[in-house]
Amino acid sequence: EKRSKVDSRNFIIYFIFYFIIYWSIMLLFSFSNITFSLIIFYRRKFNLILIEVYLINFSWSEVFLDIFI
C-alpha cells in the first residue's frame, strides 16, 4: 500500500515534468511530432501517459495558435 502511494506521486511528478518538457520542445521545434516521439521512447515506463499528454497538448496547441496567430 505504501509503495502504490509513492508510485502515484511519481506518476504526477512525471506528468508535470513531461508536460513542461513537451511544451518547451514544441515551442523550440515549431510543434514537431518527431521530437515528441523521442521523449516517448526516452521513458518507456510512462509511455501511456506521454501519449495522452501528446494528444491533449496537440489539440491545445492548435487552439493557442488560433488565438495568438
Image (tube, helix red, strand yellow):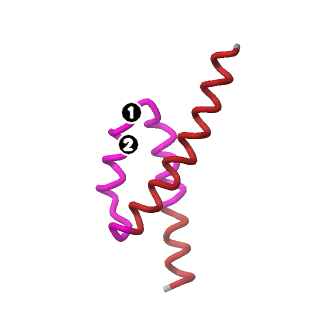
Residue pointed to by mark 1 = 44
- Residue at 69% across / 15% down in the picture? 2
- As helix, strand or loop, the secondary structure at mark 1 comes to helix
- Residue 39 image offset from top left, x and y in percent: 36, 46
Please tell me whether residue 14 is drawn above or below residue 55 in the rendered image: above
Indicate the secondary structure of the residue bearing disc 2: helix
Q: Position of residue 37 (x, y in %)?
A: 33, 48
**From which residue to which does the magenta span run?**
28-57
Dot 1, how many residues are within 10 Å of its Cα: few (below 14), some (14-19), or many (20+)? Answer: few
Q: Would you say residue 30 sits in the magenta stretch? A: yes
Q: Amino acid at mark 2?
A: Ile
Q: Which residue is mark 2?
A: 40
Q: Quadrant of the N terminus?
A: top right
> Left or right: where does residue 17 sit relative to residue 1?
left
Q: CA distance from mark 2 to mark 1?
A: 6 Å
Measured along the vertical axis of the image, is residue 67 above or below residue 11? below
Residue 33 vs residue 27, the one in the foreground: 27
Q: Which mark is residue 15?
A: none
Residue kind at label 1, given as amino acid type:
Arg
Q: Residue at x 41, y 68 (%)?
A: 27
Residue at x 39%, y 60% (from the top left corner): 25
Question: Residue at coordinates 46% horizontally, 45% vertically from top-left?
Answer: 51
Relative to 8, residue 53 above or below = below
> Can residue 49 be found in the magenta stretch?
yes
The residue positioned farthest toward the top in the image shown: 1
Q: Quick check: marks 2 and 1 in contact, CB under 8 Å?
A: yes
